[in-house]
Amino acid sequence: MTEGSENRQVRVDVKVLMEELRAEVARKRESGEYPAEWFAKGDPDSADPEARDDLDANLRRANETCLLKRREKVEESGSGNPAARFLKRILQKMVLFHTDFLADQIDRHNAAVVRVLNRYKGTMEEGAFRAARNEDVMAKYGQRIADLEDGRTAERIEAVEKALRDKGMLS
């Protein structure tokens, strides 16, 4: 800092900045600079998965995206300067060297979460199957009870009791 200069705080209007970014993305999208697959709206999973309550779609998306993509080639900016390209490659390698361990930890965490979610989904499906089977069994017992009630059960029991008394087996 030079003598007499003062510390100034720079204010950033985030709303204006976001509008500028959206306008730039729209311009680059229309010009074809951004690939169309980045903005695929026909994909049912491309809608905000957190806003939907579709377990199968969210699990499919989690299974597909649980591992981070790394070591992808950085697009060259068209600079003909070989020193700049060399410097960019060196910087990329340095950044990847320092972030690979983080990406590995994130991959392990994501894979564990997806495994738990898949197991949870399997348990839910098995529980639903068992519940449906138990409902069938309960319906059969309900029908059998209804049949017994309609079939003069009390009269039959009294007849059996009388027969046992007559034989001296029931007091």
Image (cartoon, rainbow, N blue to C red):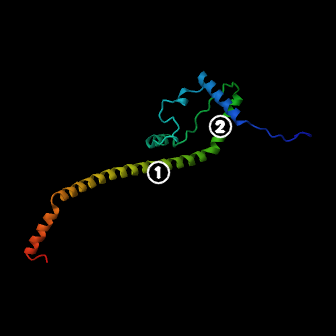
Query: Mark 1 Cα within 10 Å, few/some/many (few <14, many 20+)?
Result: few
Asked if residue 87 can be seen in this view, the reply is no
Q: Amino acid at mark 2?
A: Gln
Query: Mark 2 Cα within 10 Å, few/some/many (few <14, many 20+)?
Result: some
Which mark is on residue 116? 1
Residue 109, image x, y percentages: 53, 49
Residue at the image position 54 percent from the left and 26 percent from the top = 36
Question: Could you say whether the residue bearing mark 2 is in a helix, strand or loop?
Answer: helix
Residue 79 relative to residue 127: left or right: right
How many marks are shown on the rendered structure? 2
Residue at the image position 70 percent from the left and 32 percent from the top = 16
Residue 96 relative to residue 169: left or right: right
Among all residues in the image, which is located at the extreme top? 31
Q: If the image is split into quadrants, where does the C terminus sit?
A: bottom left
Decide which of 56, 69 is in the foreground and name it: 56
Mark 2 vs mark 1, foreground winner is 1
